[in-house]
């Protein structure tokens, strides 16, 4: 008689007690890129410029942290100028990421260009190509809060 447990690949590995800060920053950026993509979809469908964001809130009655989905105005990262050119800035929190020294925006071809560029940025973030930029931006943000 063969035990069902004998088919499993058992290891001694345990769950980590803390998360890697680089991975946390990367995941936050990816989530915000997908928010922007959802915002583009709402613009295309003619809906309002509202998008859904999942936020953590503490329930005052129980004191437990709960994930809730709320309607929240999300500002677009893109804009167009009077001469018809479109631009996109990638943000981490309130900071604009400089993808190259002194260059914080990307020129794109309309809303479809914004969408395709956001997908490229999302893929780059998943691969870890933006980790150095995110780390530097995170350090700059922390400096503002230190006395």
Image (cartoon, rainbow, N blue to C red):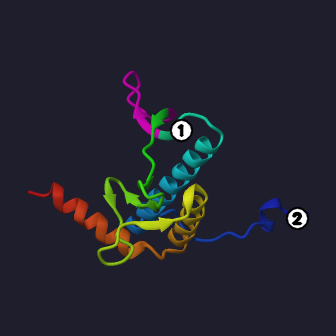
In the rendered image, residue 130, in percent from the top left (x then y), is placed at 44, 73
In the rendered image, residue 27, in percent from the top left (x then y), is placed at 48, 60
Image point (57%, 55%), residue name: 111
Magenta stretch? 55-70
In the rendered image, residue 144, in percent from the top left (x then y), is placed at 17, 58
Question: Is label 1 in contact with label 2 (beta carbons under 8 Å)?
Answer: no
Q: Which residue is mark 2?
A: 2
Give the camera-side residue of 18 and 31: 31
Residue 57 is inside the magenta segment = yes
Q: How many labels were placed on the picture?
A: 2
Give the camera-side residue of 5 and 109: 109
Identify the secondary structure beneath mark 2: loop
Q: Which residue is mark 1?
A: 52
Q: CA distance from mark 1 to mark 2?
A: 49 Å
In the rendered image, residue 93, in percent from the top left (x then y), is placed at 35, 54
Residue 123 is inside the magenta segment = no
Q: Is residue 110 above or below residue 46?
A: below
Q: Farthest right residue?
A: 1
Give the camera-side residue of 104 and 55: 104
Identify the secondary structure beneath mark 1: strand
Q: Is residue 138 left or right of residue 47?
A: left
Q: Is residue 46 left or right of residue 78?
A: right
Which label sits in the foreground, 1 or 2? 1
Main secondary-structure element of the magenta-colored stretch: strand
């Amino acid at each position: 008689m063969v035990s069902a447990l004998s088919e499993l690949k058992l290891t001694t590995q345990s769950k980590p007690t803390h998360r890697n800060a680089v991975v946390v920053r990367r995941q936050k950026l990816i989530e915000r890129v997908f928010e922007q993509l959802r915002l583009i979809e709402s613009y295309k469908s003619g809906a309002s410029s509202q998008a859904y964001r999942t936020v953590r809130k503490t329930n005052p009655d129980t004191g437990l942290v709960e994930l809730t989905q709320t309607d929240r105005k999300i500002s677009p990262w893109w804009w167009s100028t009077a001469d018809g050119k479109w631009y996109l800035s990638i943000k981490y929190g309130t900071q604009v990421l400089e993808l190259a020294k002194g260059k914080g925006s990307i020129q794109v071809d309309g809303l479809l260009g914004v969408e395709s560029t956001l997908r490229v940025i999302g893929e780059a973030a998943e691969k870890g190509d933006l980790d150095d930029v995110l780390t530097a931006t995170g350090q700059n943000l922390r400096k503002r809060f230190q006395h």
